[in-house]
Amino acid sequence: MTDLALLKNCLDKLADEYGARFLDSDPVGLVHEYDSPEDREVAGFVISVLAYGGASQIRKSGREVLSYTGKSPEKFVRDLTPDDAIGTFRSFRHR
């Protein structure tokens, strides 16, 4: 078995073992609230940028940032200008 096949096997076992059981407490659970792959990609990027600290704080901050984006984070960032970003996130603080 190749290294990639071993890695895939290991990751598949972990996915089977944990599944969606922890999504309600894991920051990545916020990503799963979106249906479109583009929205999930943006939400995942937001969560990864905030991934410093405990899971509950990351979820809190992630939910706050994603609340600004409305139903489509992808559309929000596509239309976002630097001036809009400064105004929108001026008071945002993580940790």
Image: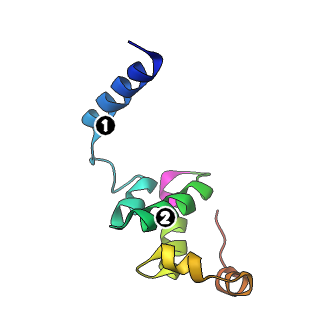
Determine the residue positioned at 32% across, 48% down: 22
What number is the disc on residue 43? 2
Residue 93 point in image, percent of width and height: 66, 71
Q: Observer-nearest residue: 69 or 22? A: 69
Locate residue 31 relative to residue 78 in the image: left or right. Answer: left
Q: Main secondary structure of the magenta part?
A: helix
Tell me which segment is drawn in magenta: 54-59
First along the sequence among labels 1 and 2:
1
Residue 88 point in image, percent of width and height: 64, 85
Determine the residue positioned at 58% across, 76% down: 77
Q: Residue at label 1?
A: 15
Q: Amino acid at mark 2?
A: Ala
**Do we see residue 59 in this rendering?**
no
Q: Observer-nearest residue: 75 or 31? A: 75
What number is the disc on residue 36? none
Q: Is residue 63 magenta?
A: no
Task: Relative to 72, say whether 27 is above or below.
Answer: above
Q: Quadrant of the C terminus?
A: bottom right
Q: Quadrant of residue 94?
A: bottom right
Q: Residue furthest front?
A: 2
**Do we see residue 18 in this rendering?**
yes
Residue 66 point in image, percent of width and height: 50, 73
Residue 36 point in image, percent of width and height: 36, 67
Q: Amino acid at mark 1?
A: Ala
Q: Quadrant of the N terminus?
A: top left
Q: Secondary structure at mark 1?
A: helix
